[in-house]
Amino acid sequence: MMYAINIYGEAGVFEQLPQDRQAEVLAGHTALQTRLAERGAFVSVKLMPPSTAVTLTPAPASDQPPLVVDGPFAETKESFLGFYAAAFRDLDEALEHARMISSPIARLEVRPIAWAGGAISTDG
Amino acid sequence: MSATCDWLAARFAQQRPRAMAALTRYFRSVDLAEEAFAEACVKALAHWPQTGTPRDPLAWLLTAARRSGLDMLRKHQRQSRLLSENQVILEAEAAPLPDPDALRDDVLRLLFICCHPALARRDQIALALRVVAGLAVPEIARGFLVKPKTMERRITRAKSRIAAHPVPFETPSPQDRARRLREVSLMIYLMFTEGWSASETETQMRPLLCQEAIRLARLLAELFPGMGEQAALLSLLLFQHARRGARVDAQGRPVAFDDQDRHLWSRAEMEEARAFFHKARRIGHQGPYLIQAAIAAEHARAASPETTDWPLIEAHYAALYALQPSPVVRLNLIAVQAKTRGPEAALAEMQELAPDLDGYRWFHTMRAAFLEQTGALGAARAAYDRARQLGPTAPERMLLDEKIAGLQKNN
């Protein structure tokens, strides 16, 4: 089954860490990427800060084009920072891989993928 | 410092501007806000490793800091019996945690307090670094290349100045908010510039000031996502900063823009700069920061000076000069015109600027380079000599000496 490992955290905290702690966090990501690459196709995405985002909101009238609002989807304490997506044998294996990038500044959500197309695909 | 400390310190640093801003409004005092926040962090250091980091660290720290601040005030009042402050205490105790809109205005107010016109520009910057960014005094002193004692005195003096000129704590009118944003953005821009182009120093750059300016620009862009000017400012600073690795050579000497190895420009940072640039343009903002970001974006796009669209850059500089008709902007425009029209034309244009910019070393370095290109080697040498007398940084002086030596050899 395919799983997404979604990363949530407070934007900007990573940048406040001293160099060696940043390196620690990055080492986890490098290790995970190497491991995933050995196993086959995967996707890994790091998003730019939420302040770069614009949001499309449905217009009040259904025949109007959506409204484009400057700013992220929601002003939350923690935001969606990035994700990995790959096929794993089961939830345990996905969790085991998520642990590789666990750090005190991030919350990780492991969530099964219902459908994926593009660089990785759930079809066949 | 234990490992836990590092992780938590990063959290505290991230909350600091918002927390300090809200606390300054509660207590009507920057000093008390600082003490209360420091104490809240001490409490968090004791609690969080046991209970886990709270889901809303800011709310936790604010609640703890308010309690600490009130305790301090009560102790202080028992001694001095300042009953008038009681009102403030009660208000603070009853007040709910600020909503996002109030917090936005709080942060802007705190930054604006630091920009008080009664303070010299450098003291405004130092104060913002201390109060908002939370840097330690010795760190700020290093940023400004002064002794910690001197910086301590300057910050203390600046604080008593602003205490004597209170900024209103009511919600600002839209006009006031716009004016505050403009002032604060300018201070952040100048903080960056101060770090980017040092003079009379041993180093070419003071990275601390640049980094902190970017951090503050990020804060504004986060708080005011619909404002084009703040997106443009952040874009501009990120574009500039992305080039830092190519700006000096291995010996620490400045590298002329055209000679920079563009592989050393940080692509990731330029991409982010471009994201904010597109956003500012989408909002429909027009202003000096956006024009400068547009110039930087064109440089970032081009693989080399040869493939750069100089006429486009010239048009941008002309637009900038129309908004900011200063001699330095004109000088930049002329530098680009040297590319589009040749060095002779540039030299002729520079004549008019000579009275204004005679004390500006870049004027003479630029003039020397154009004179050299036209073969007027004696005059070029004299211009390099003049630049050398105008307080170059140590690495710049090395470079000027090389130029002068080179011209002597050829003469």
Image (tube, grey):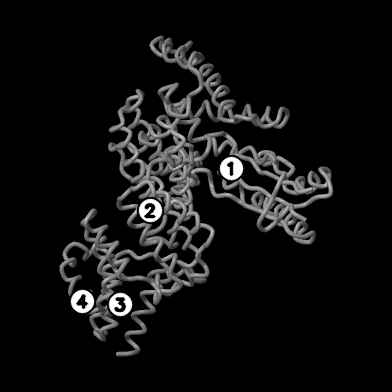
Tell me the residue that label 2 is attached to.
B194
The span from disc 3 to disc 2 (Cα, nearest Å) is 25 Å
- In this view, the residue in front, A40 or A11, is A40
Are callouts 3 and 4 both on one chain? Answer: yes
Are callouts 1 and 4 both on one chain? Answer: no
Precedes in sequence: disc 3 or disc 2: 2
Whether residue A70 appears in this view of the structure is: no
Tell me the residue that label 4 is attached to.
B345
Mark 4 residue element: helix
- Tell me the crowding category of disc 4: few under 14, some 14 to 19, or many 20 or more residues within 10 angstroms, Cα based: some
Chain letter of disc 2 in the image = B
* Left or right for B138, reference A43: left
Q: Which amino acid does label 3 sit on?
A: Ala
Tell me the residue that label 1 is attached to.
A13
Q: Which residue is drawn at 46% across and 58% down?
A: B241
Mark 3 residue element: helix
Residue that lies at the very extreme toward the front in this rendered image? A63
**Res B255 quadrant in image:** bottom left
Chain letter of disc 4 in the image = B
Q: Which residue is drawn at 26% across and 66% down?
A: B333
Do the residues under discs 3 and 2 have CB atoms within 8 angstroms? no
Mark 1 residue element: helix
- Tell me the crowding category of disc 1: few under 14, some 14 to 19, or many 20 or more residues within 10 angstroms, Cα based: some
Q: Which amino acid does label 4 sit on?
A: Ala
Tell me the residue that label 3 is attached to.
B369
Mark 2 residue element: helix
Precedes in sequence: disc 4 or disc 2: 2
Q: Where is residue B343 in the image (x, y as percent from the top left)?
A: 25, 78
The mark closer to the camera, 3 or 4, is: 4
